[in-house]
Image: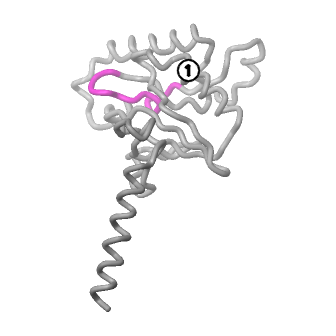
Amino acid sequence: LLFAAANQELFRRLYRTYTQSNLVGILYNPDHKLLGGEGHYATLYRGQYRATLNANEVPAAVKVRAFDASIESVETSLMLECASHPNIVKLFKLQQEGPSSYVAMELGDCSLKAAISSGGDEYDPIAICKAIAEGVRHLHASGFVHGNITPENVVLFDKTPKLCGFSCTRVVEPTIATEMSTIR
C-alpha cells in the first residue's frame, strides 16, 4: 500500500512538472507578493511570462486587479505605443480571467520610494528626474497622460528609472481635464 501511494505521489508530481513546463502566458504564485506591491488599484506579485511554448520564461511583475474595461483599453494601447522607450516599463501581456485582470510587465529591482527609504545615496537625483521627464514626454507625445506619477510608480532597473502604474493613465482628448479622478 505504501509503495502504491509513493508511486502515485511520484506520478502526480511528474505530471504537475510536465504541465507547468508547458504553460504559456502569465504565471505567478499568490504567496510571492512584491515588497510594497499592495496599491489602491492592484497587487503586484513576482512571476514569469512565457510568450510561446518554445520561448523561455522571463521574470515578470504580475499585477492583479479587478477587471476594468477602460483601464484595459488604455493599457493595451500603451503596451503597443510605448514598448520600446527606455524609461517606460514594458508590458508583456494583459489578460482577463473572470472578474480579475492580470498584467505581466518587466520586473525591476525596487520602486523609487523603496530606494529613497533605504538611503538611496548611490542614485543621482538629477539623472532620475531627467529620465522620468523623458518617459513623461514620450507618454504625452504618444497621446497619454499618466495621472499618478509618484515614487511608488517609478521602478528602478539598476540605476535606470522607468514609469509604471498605469491604472490612472488616460488617452489625451479634450475632456481629459474633467475625467481625471486624481489630483496628483
Above or below: residue 117 compared with residue 172: below
Q: Residue 156 in the image: state x and y as whole percent.
A: 34, 28
Residue receiving disc 1: 80
Q: Is mark 1 on a helix, strand or loop?
A: helix
Q: Left of 126 or right of it: where is 64?
A: right
Mark yes or no: residue 15 visible: yes
Residue found 39% across the figure and 46% down from its top: 46
Per the rendered image, the range of residues in magenta is: 149-160
Q: Residue 35 in the image: state x and y as whole percent.
A: 38, 46
Closer to the camera in the image, 127 or 96: 96
Q: Residue 91 in the image: state x and y as whole percent.
A: 49, 29
Q: Left of 171 or right of it: where is 87?
A: left
Residue found 41% across the figure and 49% down from its top: 22
Res 178 quadrant in image: top right
153 drawn magenta = yes
Q: Left of 84 or right of it: where is 42?
A: right
Q: In which quarter of the image is the C terminus?
A: top right
